Image (spheres, helix red, strand yellow):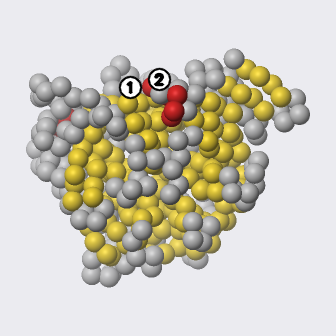
Amino acid sequence: MIKRFITTFAFTLLSGAVVHATEIGAVMETPCPYGDCSAGISLTYLGEFVIPTGKVENGVEFGGLSGLDYDDLTDRYIAISDDRAEKGPVRFYELALDISADRLTNVTVIKHVDLLDRDGEAFVTRAVDPEAFRIGNDGFYWSSEGDEKALKDPFVRVASPDGGFLREFKLPDGFAPSANRSTGVRDNLALESLAISPSGDVFVGVEAALYQDGPIPSLTTGSLTRIIRYDATTSEPKAQYLYPVSPIPQAPIQANGAADNGMSDMIALSDRHMLVVERSFAQGFGNNVKLFMIDIEGATDISKIASLDRNDKKIVPVRKSQVLDLRAFGLTPDNIEALAIGRAKDGTDVLILGADNNFSPRQKTQFYAFKIKGPLDRN
């Protein structure tokens, strides 16, 4: 059902409607995700802003935006780059986003800060692969996917605002890469997502299944991946949940072309509700990006299940419901890998999606902004 309001040029779309609408003010409503009307969410489109590949900030090429979060204290956004010290130092950026009550108008790169290793030194080339980023009460939380081919473990660390090392979270058993590829994370499909709940627990999402848990997504089947739940105070894992990644939604257009799909970021709305991005790519077509709401309440703790592929126990996965398909909404997303919830100038809550340009001239650092209303606990 579509209603057009002539004075505001806005659309109201009920969940499941498929239209092509890119006008500022377009609204996507999901009143009852997974049948729970108390979790209803509404997203109002506030526009797109693009930073072309090649922009230089303080002598270093800007790009590789893979994680993003909002700093309430400074009204700035912090974005981590997934540059593996090949274009410049391992780093995060401070950004200013100009968002009024009804439009995203500008993104300014303020500065970058180098991330340092345990010894306070700059990371050497390809020592880490930065991906996800969140601002916690005691520092900046960030993840590295490691390097499966070189048997380098993925990790989650906490850094000070000046980039110094503070501490590292314990990696659960079964996540470290293995030489025979029987267990552990897959190459470039590791600790891709981070969320911090209002109560302080830290959630870390794996992009696609561990080797022992089954295959990666295909055009006909999804992938069983894991979300780790940590106690932020002790840095110890306390639970794991099953997240079902969807099948690849689009076949490659090029003959023998590649295609994939995976969980690229997540952010907490409350202690039980999160938004999750699944980002896919198909050669000759481009990216497909879908936003889901999940509910961890009642999900099985699978931390004691060594293999999801060889398991005979009953498992309840997180509940999952699609709330936005960017292509169906009339947008053309690039490689969306980052989510943040910030504020517009009038105090309105806004959801920001950011794209990793892979430092490619064929891609762009892209930002989408949406006014967000839903089960949002900002305390």
Mark 1 burial class by Cα count in 10 Å: few <14, some 14-19, many 20+: some
Name the foreground residue: 71 vs 165.
71
Could you say which disc has been placed on residue 35 in the image? Answer: 2
Could you say which disc has been placed on residue 247 in the image? Answer: 1
- Looking at the picture, how far across and down is residue 31, in whole percent? 58, 28
- Looking at the picture, how far across and down is residue 54, in whole percent? 60, 61
| Relative vertical location of residue 110 with respect to residue 303 in this rendering, above or below | below
Residue plotted at (53% across, 55% down): 378
| Badge 2 amino acid | Gly
| Badge 1 amino acid | Pro
Q: Visible in this render: residue 238?
A: yes
Mark 2 burial class by Cα count in 10 Å: few <14, some 14-19, many 20+: few
- Looking at the picture, how far across and down is residue 353, in whole percent? 57, 48
Name the foreground residue: 360 vs 38.
38
Name the foreground residue: 315 vs 360.
315
Q: Visible in this render: residue 252?
A: no
Q: Tell me whether circle 1 and circle 2 mark residues in contact (CB < 8 Å).
A: no
Residue plotted at (33% across, 26% down): 222
Kindly state the secondary structure of the residue where label 1 is placed.
Answer: loop
Query: Which quadrant would residue 52 be assigned to in this image?
Result: bottom right
Residue 241 left/right relative to 130 = left
Kindly state the secondary structure of the residue where label 2 is placed.
Answer: helix
Query: Which quadrant would residue 231 be assigned to in this image?
Result: bottom left
Residue 227 left/right relative to 368 = left
Query: Which quadrant would residue 325 be assigned to in this image?
Result: top right
Q: Earlier in the sequence, mark 1 or mark 2?
A: 2
Q: CA distance from mark 1 to mark 2?
A: 22 Å
Residue 331 left/right relative to 339 = right
Could you say which disc has been placed on residue 149 in the image? Answer: none
Residue plotted at (22% across, 52% down): 238
